[in-house]
Image (spheres, rainbow, N blue to C red):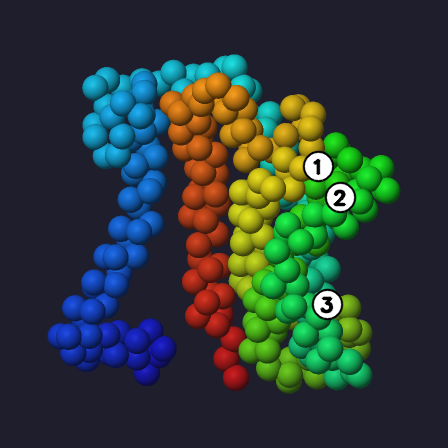
Amino acid sequence: MSKGKKKAVSVKTMSVGSKIVTWICLIWALLVALVPFVWLILSSFKKDPLARPGFQLPDSICLDGYISTFRDLHVLRYFANSLFVSGVSVLISITAISMSAYVVARMEFRGRKLVNAMLYSTMFLPATALTYPVYNLVNRLKLYNTRSSLILIYACSGIAVSFFIIRNYYDNIPHELEEAARIDGCGYTQTWARVIFPIARPGIMTAAVLAFLNNWNEYYWASLVLIDRKKLTVPALLSTFTTAFRTNYNGLFSAMVVIILPPILLYCIFSRFFVEALSGGAVKG
């Protein structure tokens, strides 16, 4: 019996109580995810969101925020900045991490556990604790107010999460495939490129998408190392709606809706990789 049929049978044999609890948890998770999104969309269509807060329907549809976002703020320029910075940083980090995770997961060497511990320990370091050393490094390298500084920071951020995902996927790959590749004359690099990478692609793509979303939504470093308005990323754009005297909530909410659409589309496109990665892929022993 196939795995899919086994899962189908197990769902059908669930007790009524288990089904009720499962549906309650799913509905609750759906509400938690959708309520803020619906609230944000409704607020973006209100001329004054503070006058009719919450889920109250707007008196009339106001598109001034969306018009000003594209016409006055040139949001597509910031989209291009975010896409470039996030894309290049993900390409650098995932390439390095996928290769290093292969070495740690598939090879025995002295200090292997220490490397694991050092990589995983970076998960517990908050960004604010690294502010001074990173800021000082960027200034010493003369990269302040450049996209290269942000690429450098993003490429070194979130290493532990990507490493954890990719390495766990490597652990599910049978060693016999590597041995067969070695018999055929492949070295370590060829084995990774021709055998390991095609099989572990769902896990690597999952780590890449998660890293891209994290970099796309990152605000702290983007607002710290970039001051030139033309170089700002999309999250840093939101600060322009707030001044010392007032906040343009209609424009702010409209810009937020525009900003979160690309990550949603990205997830929809690559959702199959998430499913394959979280289910362990198609690797069979």
Proximity of marks 2 and 3: CB atoms separated by less than 8 Å: no
With 47 as the anchor, is 118 left or right in this view? right
Residue 100 placement (x, y as % from top left) = 73, 67
Q: Which residue is mark 3?
A: 100
Proximity of marks 1 and 2: CB atoms separated by less than 8 Å: yes
Number of other residues with Cα within 10 Å of mark 3, as a class: few under 14, some 14 to 19, many 20 or more:
some
What's the residue at 45%, 49% (across, down)?
267
Residue located farthest toward the left when viewing the structure as drawn:
16
Residue 98 placement (x, y as % from top left) = 67, 64
Number of other residues with Cα within 10 Å of mark 2, as a class: few under 14, some 14 to 19, many 20 or more:
some
SS label for mark 1:
helix
Q: Earlier in the sequence, mark 2 or mark 3?
A: 3
Number of other residues with Cα within 10 Å of mark 1, as a class: few under 14, some 14 to 19, many 20 or more:
many
Of the 4 image quadrants, the one containing the N terminus is bottom left
Front residue of 89/62: it is 62
Q: Which residue is mark 2?
A: 135
User: Could one spot residue 198 in this view of the protein?
Assistant: no
With 29 as the anchor, is 254 left or right in this view? right
Proximity of marks 1 and 3: CB atoms separated by less than 8 Å: no
**Amino acid type of the residue tagged 3 in the rendering:** Ser
Q: Judge whether 174 appears above or below 76 on screen.
A: below
User: Could one spot residue 196 in this view of the protein?
Assistant: yes
Front residue of 243/137: it is 243
Q: Which residue is mark 1?
A: 225
